[in-house]
Structures are given as structure tokens and as C-alpha cells.
Amino acid sequence: QAQLVESGGGLEQAGGSLKLSCAASGRTFSRYAMGWFRQAPGKEREFVAAISWSGGSTYYAGSVKGRFTISKDNAKNTMYLQMSSLKPEDTAVYYCAADRSYVRVTDSENLEVWGQGTLVTVSS
């Protein structure tokens, strides 16, 4: 059974950095596009970043562009999100997801596999 497990969340001060990981198991995700999404308290889940199966293409939400970097290590079946210059408004549960379509990851939440989420809290 395909599974994604996020880790690396926690409490960080504004201006600090955190690195999230998304470990895949039960299936080889090397041919899957993957993405990060987040849901802040009281808000709908929103897209954060996407990466193609090869890692050659990436796409970011405007709110995180220039501060967050998405990457993927197919040999380790793991995706990462390096978050820098964190702001209190980045506080959310962060989810990773995978799909065979990169386009679907960038513009849809109807994706094949989702993780359970990891909480990131940024204090001011």
C-alpha cells in the first residue's frame, strides 16, 4: 500500500528555517510528481509547491516563492521542503501528495496519494 509520511514540523521563530521531509513507501515514486500543500487554522487547504518526477520542473505559490525550496531524491524515495524566512502566516499543517500528473499536482487536490500532515508553527 502506497504511503507518504511527513516529518520535520515543529515550532520556529519568525525569520527562522525548517526543513520538511516526505518519505514514500509501498511504491516507487520516482515517476511521480509530488507537491506540498498546507492548511492553516480555520482556512481551506492551499497549494504550496510542486516538483516534477525528474525534479527538473518546480512551481511555487506566490506567497512562498523565493523563501521555500522543493526538492526530490528519487534514490531515497523522499521529497523535501526547505522553508526559510518563515512568517507567522506560514503556520499550518503541511501535507505532501503524489500523482503521476505534474499538471494535476499544480492545479488540483484530486491526487493519488496524500500524507497525514505535519504541523508547523511560526511564532512572532
Image: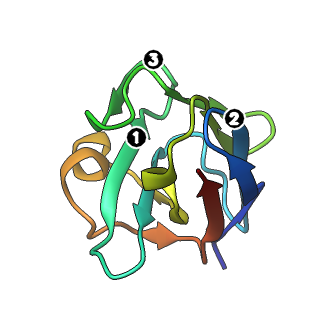
Which three-letter amino acid code belongs to the residue tagged 1? Ala
Q: Nearer the viewer, residue 105 or 1?
A: 105
Q: Earlier in the sequence, mark 3 or mark 2?
A: 2
Query: Secondary structure beneath disc 1?
Result: strand
Residue 121 location, quadrant:
bottom right
- Taking the spot 30% from the left edge, 60% from the top edge, the residue there is 46
Q: CA distance from mark 1 to mark 2?
A: 19 Å
Q: Earlier in the sequence, mark 1 or mark 3?
A: 1
Residue 98 vertical position relative to residue 16 in the rendered view, above or below: below
- Taking the spot 74% from the left edge, 59% from the top edge, the residue there is 11
Residue 28 vertical position relative to residue 113 in the rendered view, above or below: above
Q: Which residue is mark 3?
A: 56
Q: CA distance from mark 1 to mark 3?
A: 13 Å
The 10 Å Cα crowd at callout 1, few under 14, some 14 to 19, many 20 or more, is many
The 10 Å Cα crowd at callout 2, few under 14, some 14 to 19, many 20 or more, is some
Q: Nearer the viewer, residue 114 or 95?
A: 95
State the residue lying farthest toward the left: 107
Q: Is residue 21 visible?
A: no
- Say whether residue 108 is left or right of residue 24: left
Q: Nearer the viewer, residue 71 or 83?
A: 83
- Say whether residue 5 is left or right of residue 50: right
The 10 Å Cα crowd at callout 3, few under 14, some 14 to 19, many 20 or more, is few
Q: Earlier in the sequence, mark 1 or mark 2?
A: 2
Q: CA distance from mark 3 to mark 2?
A: 27 Å
Pointer 1 with pointer 2, Cβ within 8 A: no
Which three-letter amino acid code belongs to the residue tagged 3? Gly
Q: Which mark is residue 16?
A: 2
Which three-letter amino acid code belongs to the residue tagged 2? Gly
- Say whether residue 108 is left or right of residue 8: left
Residue 3 vertical position relative to residue 50 in the rendered view, above or below: below
Q: Which mark is residue 49?
A: 1
